[in-house]
Image (cartoon, rainbow, N blue to C red):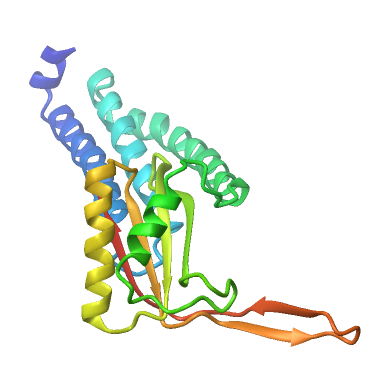
Amino acid sequence: MRDAVERNPRNRVTVGTGVLLLATGMILNYLFERHSFFGARDDLGYPVLCFFLSLTGAAVLVGGLVRSRIKQLLYFAFPTVVSLAILYICFYFGMQFLQTGADRLGECPGLDQAAASTNVIPESLSRPGNPAVGCGVERRGMFLSYYNVVGIYGVTEAAAQQRVLASLTDYYRRAHTHPVRVMLYEKENWTVRQGRNGVTFGSGGPERLIRVVNIG
């Protein structure tokens, strides 16, 4: 197999292209998973793109090793890649909608306490007497890695934000938690209304995201 690749320049180009596509998909997944370039808007799009690039690269690489004709390679790879990509999209979106965001890792209490210990987070409107901090778990990236997601509300000054981030980073390193995604919102949008029977109830509205930071 190796001799066939070395004898045919086209095979060398095909194998090189496959390796490049596979590496590109993996590298992009790592960069997008660990860094937020577009805030929260990149969550659903990049894993599918990275999976498609990686799968295409793997198919081209294998095809370049076992087949000598480019036409045969494309005929073999294209329907396989498209079919598997469609299945992956269904699986990925299904996993995103099925997860509840609950603290399934058991790491949220410590993270909440680390954020609140900075004493710069205002009191929560939805949970009076507690700081405006929320924590849950989500899955990110092509491999659906677990992330703790900590929402911070009402901390708008840069210095105060850095204090919260430093405290969470320190706790992450000491406790060896899963990676943490910190979502900083301008304020908590919570309205309390009184019903006709005198019972009060609260409801939340859309909140403005001002910063996203990944730790870990």
Residue 129 lies left or right of residue 57; in this view the side is right
Residue lying at 89% horizontally and 87% vertically, measured from the top left? 196
Residue 190 lies left or right of residue 41; in this view the side is right
Compared with 161, 5 (above or below) is above
Compared with 188, 117 (above or below) is above
Residue lying at 36% horizontally and 36% vertically, measured from the top left? 55
**Where residue 106 sits: x, y (%)?**
47, 42
**Where residue 127 sits: x, y (%)?**
58, 71
**Where residue 207 sits: x, y (%)?**
51, 79
Look at the image and tell me whether residue 48 can be seen.
no
Look at the image and tell me whether residue 66 can be seen.
yes
Pick the front one: 53 or 196? 196
Compared with 135, 125 (above or below) is below
Pick the front one: 141 or 48? 141
**In the displayed image of the protein, which residue is found farthest to the right?**
197
Residue lying at 39% horizontally and 39% vertically, measured from the top left? 143
Residue lying at 33% horizontally and 73% vertically, measured from the top left? 119
